[in-house]
């Protein structure tokens, strides 16, 4: 280029010198020069205009696509924040249902520590009594800092807005009080320094539906919100957006998070930013602003809530310096302009070259934006679908559909560990996945990806360092990718992708697979925690049977049916003497043994629950007196054999049996069975007393033999007027 330029300059200089000959030719030569320069300018002007228009169109196109991309990022960030806040909104409701949080202060504190460790989002969890005094709290925050428990115990929160509203009954079961981000003085006292937190509180009800405590969670703003903002900023930086700043503001425009350094609580941003002013009015969009002399492209999106949770009305602002965003386009524009000024042929050549380069850069950027947006749409769709899953079966179906959509050409399966983490089994799979050619790992300890918690890629089954379970598969040599599924930092399963040898998934497939694995692991972990919490809420912790409240609810549904039913009231004989003579540990073992015998000896459809102390209740659906008596005989025989095997002191049980034809009230039938049990106790124990019905039947008219009970023509009225007793020895003489 330089050589041609120099040759052209020399030629023009020589030509100019040769044309200055005589005065008569001066005008002609001057006209020639003017014509030459005019022609050059006329030739150059369209090229300059073409180059300028190409530059302008490229910048406008990139500006528009960048704005759309930044707006999508703002939407995705506020959506993630809303979902995270919704999950924290639900956490406190689930915790308040746990019977441990209304137990002794020691048990309540242990429950608080367990939840803080499990979730990791919380700095402080407290329980306050109905006078507003703090009676229990966690001892260590979610990030490992010690809580000043001794300073908190006995402190009053009675004057706080959340305690006043909850203790006054303003919130019912399943409702949560939540407050905007703030530096709560109680949290500052617990941690020794002020922290920004989010408060979620809920009432704790006893079995009678009365509020007995108020539970409050202080979630760390840094780990709930700032972690999402930091992750999004890192993603934008990796995608080529260097000079980008993210801001989170509340509904008044107060700064909550700002990567450019604006302090928490500042209102300066809303004063100078039209985007923030539009945001707090509930608008979404993209604007151009001048900030400290620099032009910025500003995308903003307001909170939409999640699944009925109204959230806080926050908004997210994404700022991109246009000088950085359009640096490549502007640099190319300068190159084009300089090239045009050198020479027309070079201008033409460079214009064509730069135009092609503009198109390629724009196309590449556009394709990258499209791929990124498609991945985000797919990821959001998978996340929203999994949020609708109520159990593992629902989640498995959703994951199977996601695999078919995201990895249609791949043989893929999702293997989940059981609660003991001793076994792996296929939970979801693609249609082309078969057990013969699939993963042969049966236990998590056999899986390298599960043990390390990292993605493992194996390009060829014949390689020396390949997983040994890839060798000898029915489909021949293959490649495989194993992606661990994690929940709260723990591996819970593996996504196994099989393909031909030396043909691993491409980058887009890996991104989709990783997204499916991440959201599936997170949702399945939450479902397991919820299942365990619900199980704890409806079962007796000592025996594993239904607790009284759950038994009453399920029995009421059974007894509402128009069919016969029996209720047995059981009580271990001389249980206090057994406790006093052999210790409470032996008493607990006896209760657990009796509970196991009841559960194993009776039918799967029979309801068995611990009513309190050594008292148990059995509901026999669609069963008359004879069927109930047969069931109790199985219990007696099994109990007699199991006591000797368990090495426990010999003990017996007495039973009261009542029957009716539904619909009938559970408490009424339990009362009749209890009266029969008292009669069994009064007349010697170790027996069944059956409550008969009918005021017109004298006591001596009742045949007490088992054979008479088995007659099918015996009628059972559903509303007893009087109770008489049939005594039947349960234990064989």
Image: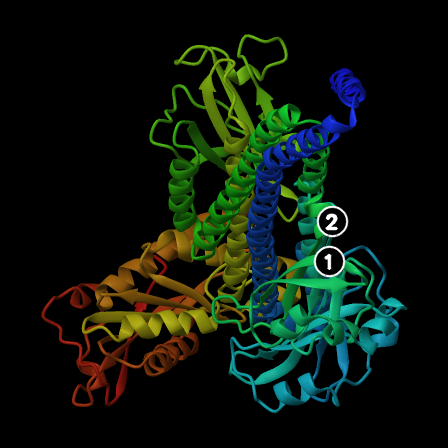
Categorize mark 2 by other alpha carbons within 10 Å: few (<14), some (14-19), many (20+): some
**Residue 163, picture quadrant:** bottom right
Q: Please determine whether, in this image, residue 497 is positioned above or below residue 475.
A: below
Q: Earlier in the sequence, mark 1 or mark 2?
A: 1
Categorize mark 1 by other alpha carbons within 10 Å: few (<14), some (14-19), many (20+): some
What residue sits right under mark 1 in the picture? 295
Q: Is residue 657 visible?
A: no
- Whole-percent x and y of residue 285? 56, 64
- Whole-percent x and y of residue 538? 49, 66
Residue closer to the observer: 121 or 591: 121
Secondary structure beneath label 2: helix
Task: Give the residue drawn at x 52%, y 71%.
Answer: 309
Task: Give the residue drawn at x 48%, y 58%.
Answer: 594
- Whole-percent x and y of residue 273? 71, 70
What residue sits right under mark 2 in the picture? 323
Q: How is the image coloured?
A: rainbow
CB within 8 Å, label 1 to label 2: yes
Task: Give the residue drawn at x 16%, y 67%.
Answer: 708
Q: Please determine whether, in this image, residue 696 is positioned above or below residue 243.
A: below
Q: CA distance from mark 1 to mark 2?
A: 7 Å
Residue closer to the observer: 492 or 542: 492
Quadrant in which the N terminus appears: top right
The residue most toward the front is: 24
Q: Please determine whether, in this image, residue 112 is positioned above or below residue 5.
A: below
Quadrant in which the C terminus appears: bottom left
The residue most toward the left is: 713
């Amino acid at each position: 280029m330089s050589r041609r330029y120099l040759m052209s300059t020399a030629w023009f200089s020589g030509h100019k010198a040769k044309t200055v000959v005589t005065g008569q030719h001066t005008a002609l030569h001057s006209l020639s020069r003017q014509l030459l320069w005019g022609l050059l300018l006329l030739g150059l002007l369209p090229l300059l205009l073409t180059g300028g228009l190409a530059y302008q169109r490229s910048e406008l196109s990139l500006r528009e696509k960048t704005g759309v991309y930044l707006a999508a990022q703002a939407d995705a960030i506020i959506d993630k924040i809303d979902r995270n806040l919704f999950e924290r909104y639900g956490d406190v409701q689930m915790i308040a249902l746990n019977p441990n949080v209304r137990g002794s202060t020691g048990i309540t504190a242990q429950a608080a520590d367990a939840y803080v460790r499990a979730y990791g989002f919380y700095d402080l969890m407290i329980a306050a009594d109905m006078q507003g005094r703090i009676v229990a709290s966690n001892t260590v925050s979610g990030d490992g800092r010690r809580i000043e428990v001794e300073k908190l115990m006995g402190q009053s929160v009675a004057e706080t807005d959340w305690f006043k509203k909850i203790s006054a009954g303003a919130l019912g079961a399943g409702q949560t009080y939540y407050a905007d981000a703030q530096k709560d003085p109680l949290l500052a006292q617990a941690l020794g320094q002020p922290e920004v937190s989010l408060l979620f509180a809920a009432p704790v009800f006893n079995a009678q539906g009365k509020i007995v405590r108020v539970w409050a969670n202080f979630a760390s703003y840094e780990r709930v919100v700032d972690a999402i903002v930091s992750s999004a900023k890192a993603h934008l930086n990796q995608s080529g957006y260097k000079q980008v700043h993210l801001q989170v503001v509340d509904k008044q425009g107060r700064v909550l998070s700002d990567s450019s350094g604006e302090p928490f609580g500042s209102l300066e941003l809303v004063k100078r930013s039209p985007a923030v002013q539009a945001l707090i009015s509930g608008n979404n969009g993209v604007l151009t602003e001048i900030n400290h002399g620099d032009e910025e492209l500003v995308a903003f999106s307001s909170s939409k809530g999640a699944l009925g949770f109204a959230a806080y009305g926050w908004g997210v602002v994404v700022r991109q310096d246009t000088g950085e965003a359009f640096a490549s386009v502007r640099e190319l524009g300068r190159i084009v302009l300089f090239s045009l000024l050198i020479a027309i042929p070079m201008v033409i050549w460079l214009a064509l070259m730069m135009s092609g380069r503009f198109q390629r850069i724009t196309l590449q950027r556009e394709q990258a934006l499209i791929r990124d947006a498609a991945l985000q749409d797919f990821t959001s769709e998978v996340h929203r679908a999994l949020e609708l899953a109520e159990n593992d079966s629902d989640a498995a179906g959703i994951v199977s559909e996601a695999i078919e959509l995201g990895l249609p050409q791949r043989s893929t399966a999702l293997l989940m560990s059981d609660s003991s983490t001793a076994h792996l089994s296929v939970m979801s799979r693609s249609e082309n996945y078969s057990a013969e050619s699939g993963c042969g790992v049966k236990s998590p300890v056999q899986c390298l990806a599960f043990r390390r918690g990292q993605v493992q890629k194996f390009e060829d089954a014949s390689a020396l360092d390949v997983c040994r379970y890839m060798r000898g598969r029915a489909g021949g040599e293959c490649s495989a990718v194993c992606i661990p599924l994690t929940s709260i930092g723990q591996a819970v399963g593996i996504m196994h992708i099989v393909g031909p040898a030396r043909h691993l998934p491409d980058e887009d497939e890996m991104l989709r697979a990783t997204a499916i694995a991440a959201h599936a692991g997170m949702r399945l972990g939450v479902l397991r925690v919820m299942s365990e919490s619900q199980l704890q809420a409806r079962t007796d912790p000592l025996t594993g049977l239904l607790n009284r409240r759950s038994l009453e609810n399920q029995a009421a549904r059974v007894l509402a049916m128009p069919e016969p039913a029996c209720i047995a009231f059981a009580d271990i004989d001389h249980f206090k003497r057994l406790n006093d003579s052999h210790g409470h540990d032996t008493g607990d073992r006896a209760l657990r043994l009796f509970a196991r015998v009841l559960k194993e000896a009776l039918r799967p459809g029979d309801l068995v629950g611990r009513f309190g102390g050594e008292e148990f209740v059995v509901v026999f659906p669609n069963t008359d007196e004879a069927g109930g008596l047969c069931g109790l005989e199985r219990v007696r025989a099994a109990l007699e054999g199991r006591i000797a095997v368990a090495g426990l002191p010999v003990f017996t049980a007495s039973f009261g049996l009542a029957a009716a034809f539904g619909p009938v009230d559970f408490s009424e039938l339990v009362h009749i069975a209890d009266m029969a049990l008292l009669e069994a106790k009064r007349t010697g124990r170790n027996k069944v007393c059956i409550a008969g019905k009918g005021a017109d039947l004298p006591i001596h008219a009742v045949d007490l033999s088992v054979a008479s009970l088995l007659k099918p023509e015996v009628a059972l009225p559903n509303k007893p007027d009087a109770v008489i007793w049939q005594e039947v020895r349960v234990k064989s003489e």
